[in-house]
Amino acid sequence: MMETLELANYNFYSNRLDMELISNIVEGFKEILEEDKKQKQPLFLRVQDNFIMNIARKVVQEKKKTFLIGITGESASGKTVFVDNTIKAVVRDKKEGIYTVIRCDDYYKDTSKELQAAGSYEELFKSGFSFDTPDVINLKLMKEHLIGLKNGETVVSPRYDFKTCESHPDGDVKTPAKVILTEGLYVLNEEVRDIMDVKVYVFTPLNVIKERWYKRAISRGKTGEAADLQFKDVNKTAQQYIRPTYQIADCIINGMVTQEYIQEITDKMFKKISDIVSQI
């Protein structure tokens, strides 16, 4: 009987402490978001009502579980920049076991034979081939790797060459971590999104996307008519496959903010979590 009462008392005080910590995180985040709103270019454009509460609960009550964050947006919207600068803010000492990144671009299927048969990118695109639909990416394998990481397994992501369209199985070793960041065009595709703990959409105006996209296309061996043909397809497929995920995202991120500001605000958020959780 005494042991039962002691357990009940422990659970009562434990739950009360959890709720206090959750409340502190929520209030801290709200303060940061209010300051963000005052900026000429705020980082957060829209946040779902339950977004902050869900994060706070997971941090406090599921602290031993892996946290999977999916970041999507149109091609050249700024997904990679957001992820890379978030990492810089969160991990100063490169300590292992804190984060792992899975990039959708690494999972493009090998289409080198199709490119060789066409003879050039121009001819490949004229044939109707698209690099911007979900079926050209091995989402099944990517999902398997994400689930494996969440379960504490080590995986090896593929390595894709954007100039030759070759996919190599000997990519980077990805180890389990507290936070898994996955970014790319289709990480919120219906085939993958059910395993995400947080869904993020990076929004950037089309004219900015176009300018960024053409600059990057040159580095990937696409210029002139080849670049024009692919960008036309990029815009078309974004309307069909990517933009609809805007509606299901937990938060909308501004792809126009500076790298410095991304680091600044994410540093504040993670520092707030760290300071509160250290009380446990």
Image: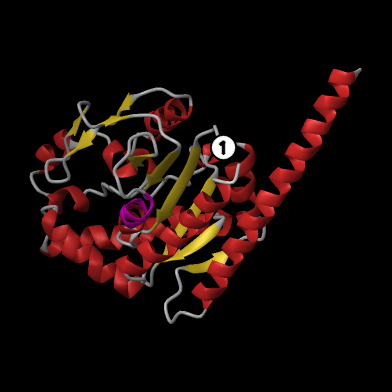
Q: What count of labels does the image hold?
A: 1
The percent position of residue 89, horizontal first and vertical second, equals 36, 56
**Residue at the image point whose x is 62% and y is 60% from the top:** 48
Rendered image quadrant of residue 146: top left
Residue placed under numbered mark 1 in the picture: 63
Q: Amino acid at mark 1?
A: Lys
Residue at x 88% of width, y 25% of height = 5
- Assess whether residue 86 is covered by the magenta stretch: yes
Q: Nearer the viewer, residue 272 or 245?
A: 272
What residue lies at 8% left-to-right and 44% top-to-bottom? 119
Q: Which of the image's four quarters has the C terminus?
A: top right
Q: Residue furthest front?
A: 2
Residue 131 seen in the figure: yes
Give left or right: position of 274 versus 77: right
Q: Residue at x 39, y 39 (%)?
A: 98
Q: How is the image coloured?
A: secondary structure
- Residue 94 place in picture, x, y as percent: 29, 43
- Which region of the structure is painted magenta? 84-90
Q: Quadrant of the N terminus?
A: top right
Q: Is residue 71 magenta?
A: no
- Residue 2 versus residue 190 in the image, above or below: above
Instruction: Examine the image and state in which quarter residue 216 appears.
Output: bottom left
Residue farthest to the right, as pictured: 1
The image quadrant that residue 139 belongs to is top left
Up the image or down, 227 lies above or below 10; here it is below
Give percent across and percent down for residue 63: 56, 37
Query: Regarding mark 1 in the picture, which secondary structure is present there?
Result: loop
The one of 196 and 19 positioned closer to us in this rendering = 19
Q: Position of residue 249 (x, y in %)?
A: 54, 55
Q: Is residue 226 visible?
A: no
In terms of secondary structure, what is the magenta stretch mainly? helix
Are there few (<14), some (14-19), or many (20+) residues within 10 Å of tag 1? Answer: few
